[in-house]
Image: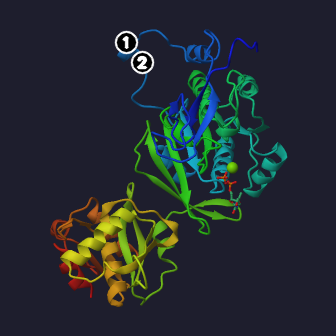
């Protein structure tokens, strides 16, 4: 490059994608520290790169609405029902699916297994790995006992070469592991930078749409600013799935956070085993398997995930603060929510709890996001505080308001049915939900209007 033509650069946040002409220690948009990295401005030459990518989608003329096929998108199930559920019933040809998650959580394993299942049905699948050699990946395939004939493997990071091979092989499904390792020659920045990531994804999108290839992109969630995270791609793709779990726990949850072809509140449940990921058909039973009976602070919450009721153990430990400000730690539930519930307990149920250290944990590494678990959190906190165990055959659910009132929740009947199926004898639930339900054999249904009422029934 000549000296006169200076390369233009800008500073891009690797967390949220915000760019600015100046460097900041803290991103002005997402407020993350140290995530701004200098990148070369993408140079678009008309007809090449970006331009060609969009041209490749084709059908670039107005069509009558009635002429366009749509409505019933054809889907082909992967054959792993927990994955198909989250996808909204199967793979849509030409769709771009981002699978995000922490390094080591099991993204590659899940996609290796999915690749094998799809290929078993005779569809051509190309698995591109940018992280390991083909031999290493082969060893992984062996570990999960994958052996399909129409499964192809390639270790490559240059997008142009991948495109060329896709052209030749014409796969029905393409898997890119991971998108952060890929680079295209048109962009000056390093692989993994926001500019590269976006350019690569735009090209893969064009490839997917143009050739009707269902494409999975693996994206590692990153903590530091060196590599851009999958967040910066969320708006470009059709479906965003996050694979979650806690270190040291075998349980994994696949969650849809965006889906143009299905609902976003479905989850898929998996367990990491020695031979890959196994589907978990009954997550409640798994979560409750190791529950300690007769200890204070342990309560079974009647939760809901997607279309499925889920019983999970919520554990609390409340102890007097020895010095300074009380400690508050919550794992698996939002800590702001816990602070709010502690205030309700203090003010509306008369418990002297605000000055205590509070630790809260959801067993099994599960993350609970719906407000219906409020009542279980309250019950666990109260149980630990007064040091009296809750009857182990009791399930608790209900949203708690600031006045201490217990509000109705969705899916009360399904929560009760799940409790009965797993042998629980008593359900403490919102009074309004209780009124809608008939009496059940073998399960006592107790409706409560106020936190105080629920605590009376519990202790
Ligand atoms: P991996 O799929 O490589 O994670 P990611 O692609 O998200 O970075 O899985 C990583 C972990 O899973 C690794 O620590 C080993 C473990 N694992 C098993 O326990 N059983 C298995 O069969 C496989 C393939 C991996
Ligand atoms: Mg991997």
Secondary element under disc 1, as helix, strand or loop, is loop
Q: Quadrant of ligand 1?
A: bottom right
Q: Distance between the residues labelled 1 and 2?
A: 7 Å
Q: Which numbered disc covers residue 338?
A: none
Which of 239/418 is in front?
239
Q: Name the residue under label 1.
A: 64
Q: How crowded is mark 1: few (under 14 residues within 10 Å), some or many (20 or more)?
A: few
Q: Is residue 301 above or below residue 231?
A: below
* Residue 135 percent coordinates (x, y): 84, 47
Residue at position x 18%, y 80% from top?
A: 453
Quadrant hosting residue 54: top right
Name the residue at 16% across, 66% down. Answer: 432
> In which quadrant will I find the N terminus?
top right
Q: Is residue 446 visible?
A: no
In this rendering, position of residue 38 left or right of residue 369? right
Q: Where is residue 367 in the image (x, y as percent from the top left)?
A: 45, 62
Residue 68 circle label? 2
Q: Which residue is drawn at 43% across and 22% down?
A: 69
Locate residue 211, reporting x and y percent. Answer: 61, 23
* Quadrant assignment, res 361: bottom left
Q: How many residues crowd around disc 2 within 10 Å: few (fewer than 14), some, or many (20 or more)? A: few
Q: Residue 25 sits in which quadrant? A: top right
Percent x, y of residue 130: 74, 40
Name the quadrant of the C terminus: bottom left
CB within 8 Å, label 1 to label 2: yes
Mark 2 C-beta closer than 8 Å to ligand 1? no
Nearer to us in this view, 402 or 23: 23
Does residue 67 appear to the left or right of 146 in the view shown?
Answer: left
Q: Is residue 383 visible?
A: yes
Mark 1 C-beta to ligand 1 under 8 Å: no
SS under mark 2: loop
């Amino acid at each position: 490059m000549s000296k006169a033509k200076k390369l233009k650069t800008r500073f891009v946040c690797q967390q949220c994608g915000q760019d600015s002409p100046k460097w900041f220690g803290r991103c002005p948009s997402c407020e993350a520290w140290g995530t701004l990295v200098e990148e070369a401005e993408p140079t678009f030459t008309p007809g090449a790169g970006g331009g060609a990518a969009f041209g490749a989608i084709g059908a670039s003329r107005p069509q009558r609405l009635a002429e366009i096929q749509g409505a019933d998108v054809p889907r082909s199930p992967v054959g792993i029902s927990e994955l198909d559920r989250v996808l909204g019933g199967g793979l849509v040809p030409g769709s771009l699916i981002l699978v995000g998650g922490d390094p080591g959580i099991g993204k590659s394993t899940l996609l290796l297994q999915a690749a094998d299942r799809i290929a078993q049905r005779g569809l051509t699948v190309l698995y591109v790995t940018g992280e390991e050699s083909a031999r290493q990946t082969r060893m992984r395939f062996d570990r999960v006992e994958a052996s399909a004939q129409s499964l192809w493997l390639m270790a490559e990071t240059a997008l142009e070469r991948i495109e060329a091979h896709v052209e030749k092989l014409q796969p029905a499904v393409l898997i890119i592991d991971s998108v952060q390792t890929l680079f295209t020659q048109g962009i000056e920045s390093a692989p993994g930078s926001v500019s590269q990531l976006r350019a690569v994804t735009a090209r893969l999108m064009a490839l997917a749409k143009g050739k009707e290839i269902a494409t999975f992109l693996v994206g590692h969630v990153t903590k530091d600013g060196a590599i851009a995270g999958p967040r910066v791609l969320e708006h470009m793709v059709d479906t965003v799935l996050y694979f979650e779990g806690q270190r040291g726990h075998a349980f994994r949850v696949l969650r849809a956070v965006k889906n143009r072809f299905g609902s976003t509140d479905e989850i898929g449940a998996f367990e990491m085993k020695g031979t890959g990921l196994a589907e978990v058909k009954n997550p409640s039973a798994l979560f409750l398997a190791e529950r300690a009976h007769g200890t204070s602070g342990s309560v079974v919450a009647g939760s809901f995930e997607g279309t499925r009721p889920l019983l999970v153990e919520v554990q609390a430990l409340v102890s007097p603060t020895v010095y300074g400000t009380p400690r508050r730690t919550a794992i698996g539930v939002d800590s702001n929510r816990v602070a709010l519930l502690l205030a309700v307990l203090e003010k509306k149920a008369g418990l002297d709890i605000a000055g205590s250290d509070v630790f809260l944990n959801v067993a099994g590494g599960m993350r609970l996001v719906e407000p219906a678990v409020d009542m279980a959190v309250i019950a666990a906190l109260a149980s630990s505080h007064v040091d009296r165990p809750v009857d182990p055959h009791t399930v608790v659910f209900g949203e708690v308001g600031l006045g201490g009132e217990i509000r109705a929740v969705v899916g009360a009947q399904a929560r009760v049915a799940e409790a009965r199926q797993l042998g629980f004898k008593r359900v403490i639930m919102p009074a309004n939900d209780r009124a809608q339900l008939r009496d059940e054999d073998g399960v006592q249904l107790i409706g409560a209007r106020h936190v105080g009422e629920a605590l009376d029934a519990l202790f």
